[in-house]
Structure formats: C-alpha cells, structure tokens
Amino acid sequence: MQNNYRLEDIAESPRFTALVKTRLRISSLLSLLMVILYTLFLIGMAYFPQLMGDMQIIGASISFGIWCAMALCFVCLALSWYYTWWANNRFDVMKEKYLREMAMSGDAADAKE
C-alpha cells in the first residue's frame, strides 16, 4: 500500500497537533515529577544529613538516605515503565489510526481524480 498523504497535510492537521501535544504533555509531566523527586532527595542530603544518615528511623542496618535513594531508583523505573506502556498501548495506537485515516482520505482523493 502506497502512502498518498503529504507531510505538510499531516503537520497542519489539528488531530496530529493534538496527538503531539498529548505526547509532549505526558513526557513533560513525568520528567518534571522525576526532577522534583531528585531535587527533594538532594535537598534532603544537603540540609538534613542527620536525618538521611539515621539508621533508627526504619530499624534496619541501612540508613534512611540509602532507602530514599533506592526508592528514587524504583520510582524512576516505574515512571519509565509507565511512559513506555503508555507510548506503546495508547500513543502508537492513536498514531496508527490517524495515519490509516490519512491514507484512506488520500486514496479517496486519488479515486476522485
């Protein structure tokens, strides 16, 4: 099947720009969340070293700061997993549907000629 749509038509389409804005909004939100969490971790290490180095908070032999660092790593992995899942199951499906519709409308325009 040959694609008969022009890239300019796709870029100017309101549905395509909404699709791009949605992807940008999700990725920006997740990135901002990660930056905020990492900044909070750094602030905790810089301004509350006694709290972050305390081993009595949780009752384990690992300090609270290490627990926070491990939690930060797991949150980062979870956010990455979520974005990958969203992109594969939501965004790519919407994109393929849109491109199929563009191809069909291009085929219909060729049939009229």
Image (spheres, rainbow, N blue to C red):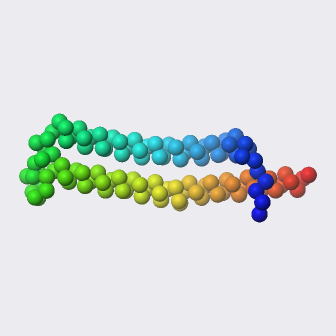
Q: Position of residue 98 (x, y in %)?
A: 67, 53
Q: Residue at x 25, y 55 (%)?
A: 70
Specify the farthest residue to the top. 47
Residue that sits furthest to the left in the current view:
56
Residue drawn 30% across the image and 44% down it: 38
Question: How far across and down, in percent of the image, does residue 111 sit?
Answer: 88, 56
Percent coordinates x, y for residue 93 in the rendering: 60, 58
Q: Residue sitting at 14 percent across and 41 percent down?
A: 49
Q: Residue furthest bottom?
A: 1
| Residue 13 is at least partly visible in this image | no
Quarter-of-image position of residue 20: top right
Q: Can residue 98 be seen?
A: yes
x and y percentages locating residue 37 in the rendered image = 31, 44
Left or right, 23 with respect to 35, comes to right
Q: In the displayed structure, does residue 20 sit left or right of residue 50?
A: right
Q: Quadrant of the N terminus?
A: bottom right
